[in-house]
Image (cartoon, coloured by chain):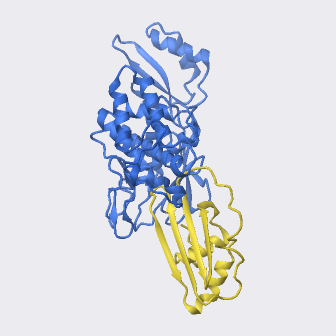
Chain colours: A yellow, B blue
């Protein structure tokens, strides 16, 4: 999974975000299937993320969230596990959008 | 002892000198002379003055916490601004006072039950940040401080509301400075379990509860009324803390045969911690009395110097070694610890048993 980002607008975009860990250890999942009219925006959100970039060194500490981010652009699948501290920039925008927080700037 | 003054090396020198010359109170004079000779403690301390049965004034210096609470003002910038320091009176913000009091309760457990002066056994200051993020559903230990979110108000309330959660986060600090257990898979679940042990014991120590009186819940009161659940976890009955339409059922296993293999949650560290959690609660309930006095002491001693990659079986063996060292003449303790691990399917000799 992952690989060369798709640059053309996908006809079908599905994004799934799962949040695990945290002191509560509860699992929450959000899934979005983009309406056709928004497919171009969602394609940009997905392809802007550095899916193949090596993971940053895990920070010290405990009870941080762990994020499983998955996306499907037509037949191309992407997947990445991120520590909470890595959820910045394009990752944050994609996850916030999937959680319905895209334009609010609100941060969990 | 009756604490009369919270002091941090600020007992006036003239008072110590005068006490040192006292003939009416020879023990206080001796204590004052020792303090003058040895110098001030490097960390914060409290002067306790009591009168013994013979009517002598007895002065003693005991370790004291050094707390600072910051406010992130609903940003994710740490540490935030200082809102309450040690010895300062309560402020109007309940989250600040809850964090301050919770850190004090956790410090009291470490010192009173284990003779440990703060996280590092050397009087390290305790730092907490409240109001982290927006609707942030979590509390965490970032390697140097405890950080608390306010919760989303729908599922979670603010995380400072639970003393066991605060004790849990401080417990991660103790684990970090003693064994540095890896935060993944079985060592990570053990790390989580030990943090829960410190969390539960903090709550029990503050309330003076026996093992039988304790709830053995972690995070009681963290859920809103909309959630069908009592707490985040149950140490005595893992898997029973909640069963809710939105959150699902508490997924914690209580036995090695139900160990969860997953890539999520750093390998299920908050899930499989239910197994050693139940072992601890079972041992403490079998021994009776205050859980921090025998079971807690055994677990605390076993934690010292663990290999960072140790699993449940290795830790179980360490608890048996610790029980024999602490209570060698009392087989009741060793027997209770061995039976507790057996009840969750963990063989202490290095093999995990799956019944």
> Is residue B250 in sight in this rendering?
yes
Q: Residue at x 52, y 54 (%)?
A: A63
Q: How many marks?
A: 0
| Vertical position of residue B249 compared to residue B338: above or below | below
Quarter occupied by residue B298: top left
**Residue A28, horizontal then vertical, whole percent:** 46, 68
Q: Is residue B5 left or right of residue B295?
A: right
Q: Residue at x 48, y 62 (%)?
A: B137
Q: Nearer the viewer, residue B26 or B287?
A: B287
Q: Residue furthest bottom?
A: A37
**Residue B219, horizontal then vertical, whole percent:** 39, 53
Q: Residue at x 41, y 15 (%)?
A: B57
Q: Nearer the viewer, residue B316 or B96?
A: B316
| Vertical position of residue B320 compared to residue B137: above or below | above
Q: Residue at x 46, y 48 (%)?
A: B166
Quarter occupied by residue B280: top left
Quarter of the N terminus of chain A within the rendering: bottom right
Q: Is residue A75 left or right of residue B50?
A: right
| Vertical position of residue B173 compared to residue B335: above or below | below
| Vertical position of residue B240 compared to residue B56: above or below | below
**Residue B93, horizontal then vertical, whole percent:** 46, 55
């Amino acid at each position: 999974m992952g690989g060369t980002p798709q640059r053309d607008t996908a006809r079908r975009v599905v994004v799934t975000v799962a949040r695990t860990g945290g002191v509560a250890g509860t699992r929450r999942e959000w899934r979005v299937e983009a309406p056709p009219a928004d497919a171009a925006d969602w394609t940009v959100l997905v392809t802007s993320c550095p899916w193949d970039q090596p993971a940053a060194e895990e920070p010290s500490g405990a009870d941080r969230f762990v994020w499983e981010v998955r996306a499907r652009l037509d037949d191309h699948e992407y997947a990445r596990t991120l520590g909470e501290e890595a959820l910045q920039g394009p990752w944050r925008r994609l996850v916030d959008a999937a959680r319905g927080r895209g334009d609010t700037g609100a941060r969990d | 002892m009756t604490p009369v003054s919270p002091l941090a090396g600020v007992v006036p020198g003239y008072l110590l000198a005068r006490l040192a010359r006292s003939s009416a109170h020879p023990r206080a004079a001796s204590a004052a002379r020792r303090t003058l000779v040895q110098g001030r403690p490097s960390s914060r301390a409290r002067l306790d003055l009591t009168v013994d049965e013979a009517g002598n004034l007895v002065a003693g210096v005991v370790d004291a916490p050094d707390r600072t609470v910051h406010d992130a003002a609903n940003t994710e910038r740490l540490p935030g601004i200082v809102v309450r320091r040690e010895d300062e009176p309560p402020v109007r913000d309940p989250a600040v006072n809850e964090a301050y009091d919770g850190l004090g309760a956790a410090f009291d457990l470490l010192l009173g039950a284990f003779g440990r002066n703060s996280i590092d056994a050397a009087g390290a200051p305790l730092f907490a940040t409240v109001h982290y993020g927006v609707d942030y559903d979590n509390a965490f230990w970032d390697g140097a401080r405890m950080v608390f979110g306010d919760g989303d108000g729908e599922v979670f309330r603010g995380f400072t509301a639970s003393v066991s959660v605060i004790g849990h986060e401080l417990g991660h600090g103790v684990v970090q400075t003693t064994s540095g257990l890896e935060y993944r898979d079985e060592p990570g679940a053990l790390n989580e379990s030990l943090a829960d042990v410190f969390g539960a014991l903090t709550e029990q120590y503050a309330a003076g509860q026996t093992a039988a009186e304790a709830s053995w819940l972690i995070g009681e009161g963290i859920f809103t009324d909309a959630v069908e659940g009592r707490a985040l976890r149950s140490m005595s009955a893992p898997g029973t803390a909640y069963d809710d339409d939105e959150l699902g059922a508490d997924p914690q296993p209580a036995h090695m045969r139900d160990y969860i293999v997953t890539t999520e949650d750093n390998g299920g560290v908050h899930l499989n911690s239910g197994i050693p959690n139940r072992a601890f609660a079972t041992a403490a309930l079998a021994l009776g009395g205050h859980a921090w006095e025998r079971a807690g002491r055994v677990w605390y001693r076993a934690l010292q110097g663990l290999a960072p990659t140790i699993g449940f079986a290795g830790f179980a063996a360490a608890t048996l070694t610790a029980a024999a060292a602490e209570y060698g003449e009392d087989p009741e303790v060793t027997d209770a610890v061995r039976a507790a691990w057996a009840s969750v399917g963990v063989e202490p000799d290095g093999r995990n048993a799956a019944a």
